């Protein structure tokens, strides 16, 4: 197993640091150390220490931006903000290589032209899943749901990102079918639709009515 | 350099059949979306405003589209990160790639050059024969800058 991956996971062993990581992820926008310190109830220096360790472990990345609209002399220097990095950390013990299997299967399905069979299976699985509240079901599957100003649910993380980048129509189509099955099966008051946008899942759950 | 793209597909039903209606109805909207996308340069079109009238493979059920973009990223952003993806998701309802080895080929073209259908077919042949090379490659295996 890759040393970097172990270090990435190891960085989360400290409960305060793990909470700092979760705060940044849940915020869905870059956040500064002051905000994290406030939320965690720790000092700014300690918050910055944990955030910088998470950057070293490649779980977060630092960006610099001004928090106010002021520019020019007197505006102060840009603040250091933190957001989740694009790096994917996967640790399976003993080693199992599901991403590779997924990639091989996806290519085979694409060659066989069996997209519609894949969508059918995904829909049926979604519909048969035990009914849960929408929020819990989406969270558990790693979608990181958030409500838009229009009242729709957007999904801030794509659980299938690696494969979706490689086979977009196939995997995004599967994902839409899965979410449609989940919504129908559990009677959520939403209609899943393909509305792709960079940096988040391609499906938006549109509020009904 | 710009990037040329040829896409070929075998229709499962005649273009004017009810099965193809959703595809045909979406063409003006999707073509307009493409034309307005960042990095779009050119697309092949006939008098009807799209490329469905061209049958360069000598069979009535194989249609093509031929476009030019500023970069692979611009092309990817249009096909995978707009409403276009919704129609790609449904491609098997309307199309099959049976009897076609590759159905998409990309190749570099000088800025200002408009690719011909013959040129595009030759690039597809090259890809079929030699696999992805800087002369002709695919979205999954982009070769060269």
Image (cartoon, coloured by chain):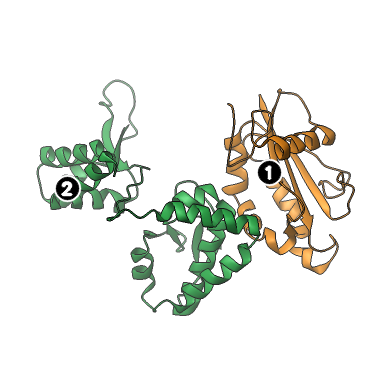
Chain colours: A green, B orange
x and y percentages locating residue B5 in the rendered image: 71, 38
Q: Is residue A62 above or below residue A125?
A: above
- Nearest the viewer among A43 and B43 is B43
User: Going by the picture, which residue comes out furthest to the top?
Assistant: A73
Along the line of sight, which residue is nearer the eye, A176 or A206? A176
Circle 2 residue: A17
**Closer to the eye: label 2 or 1:** 2
* Image position of A154 with respect to A162: above or below: below
Tell me how many marks there are. 2
The answer to which quarter of the image holds residue A43 is top left
Viewer-side residue, A102 vs A20:
A102
Q: What residue is shown at x 64% (from left), y 31% (from top)? A: B133
Question: Dividing the picture into quarters, in which one does residue B43 lie?
Answer: top right
Check the residue under mark 1 and report the chain it is in: B
In percent of the image, x 34 and y 50: which residue is there? A28
The alpha-carbon separation of the residues under discs 2 and 1 comes to 45 Å
Q: Which residue is disc 1 drawn over?
A: B34
Marks 2 and 1 on same chain: no
Please tell me which residue lies in front, A62 or A89. A89
Quadrant including the N terminus of chain B = top right
Q: Residue at x 77, y 53 (%)?
A: B99
Task: Find residue A120 and report its horizontal and vertical position in percent.
Answer: 57, 71
- Residue B98 picture location, percent across and down: 75, 56
Q: Is residue B48 visible?
A: yes
Q: Could you tell me if residue A148 is visible in this image?
A: no
Q: Secondary structure at mark 2?
A: helix
Instruction: Give the image location of residue A96, x and y in percent.
Output: 35, 55
Q: Chain of mark 2?
A: A
Q: Indicate the secondary structure of the residue bearing disc 1.
A: helix
The quadrant in which the C terminus of chain B is found is top right
Please say if the residues under marks 2 and 1 sit with CB atoms less than 8 Å apart. Answer: no
Task: Say above or below: A128 vs A38.
Answer: below
């Amino acid at each position: 197993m890759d040393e970097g991956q172990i270090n990435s996971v190891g960085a989360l062993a400290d409960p305060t640091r793990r909470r700092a990581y979760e705060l940044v992820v849940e915020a869905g926008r870059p956040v500064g150390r002051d905000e994290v310190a406030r939320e965690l109830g720790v000092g700014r220096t300690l918050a910055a220490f944990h955030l910088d360790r998470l950057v070293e472990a490649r779980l977060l990345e630092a960006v610099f931006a001004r928090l106010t609209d002021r520019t020019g002399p007197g505006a102060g220097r840009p603040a250091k903000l933190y957001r989740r990095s694009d790096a994917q950390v996967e640790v399976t013990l003993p080693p199992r290589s599901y991403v590779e299997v997924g990639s091989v299967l996806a290519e085979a399905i694409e060659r066989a032209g069996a997209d519609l069979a894949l969508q059918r299976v995904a829909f049926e699985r979604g519909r048969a899943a035990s009914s849960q509240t929408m929020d819990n079901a989406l969270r558990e599957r790693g979608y990181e749901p958030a409500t838009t100003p229009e009242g729709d649910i957007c999904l801030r993380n794509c659980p299938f990102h690696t494969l979706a980048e490689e086979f977009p129509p196939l995997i995004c189509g599967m994902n839409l079918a899965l979410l449609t099955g989940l919504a129908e099966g559990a009677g959520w008051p939403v209609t899943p639709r393909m509305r792709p946008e960079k940096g988040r899942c391609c499906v938006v759950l549109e509020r009904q009515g | 350099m710009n990037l040329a793209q040829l896409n070929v597909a075998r229709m499962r039903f005649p273009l004017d059949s009810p099965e193809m209606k959703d595809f045909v109805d979406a063409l003006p909207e999707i073509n307009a979306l493409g034309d307005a996308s960042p990095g779009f340069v050119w697309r092949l079109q006939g008098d009807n405003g799209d490329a469905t009238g061209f049958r360069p493979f000598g069979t009535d059920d194989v249609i093509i589209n031929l476009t030019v973009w500023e970069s692979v990223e611009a092309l990817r952003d249009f096909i995978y990160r707009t409403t276009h993806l919704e129609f790609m998701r449904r491609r098997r309802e309307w199309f099959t790639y049976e009897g076609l080895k590759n159905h998409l080929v990309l190749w570099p073209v000088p800025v200002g050059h408009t690719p011909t259908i013959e040129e595009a077919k030759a690039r597809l042949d090259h890809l079929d024969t030699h696999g992805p090379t800087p002369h002709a490659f695919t979205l999954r295996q982009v070769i060269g800058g």
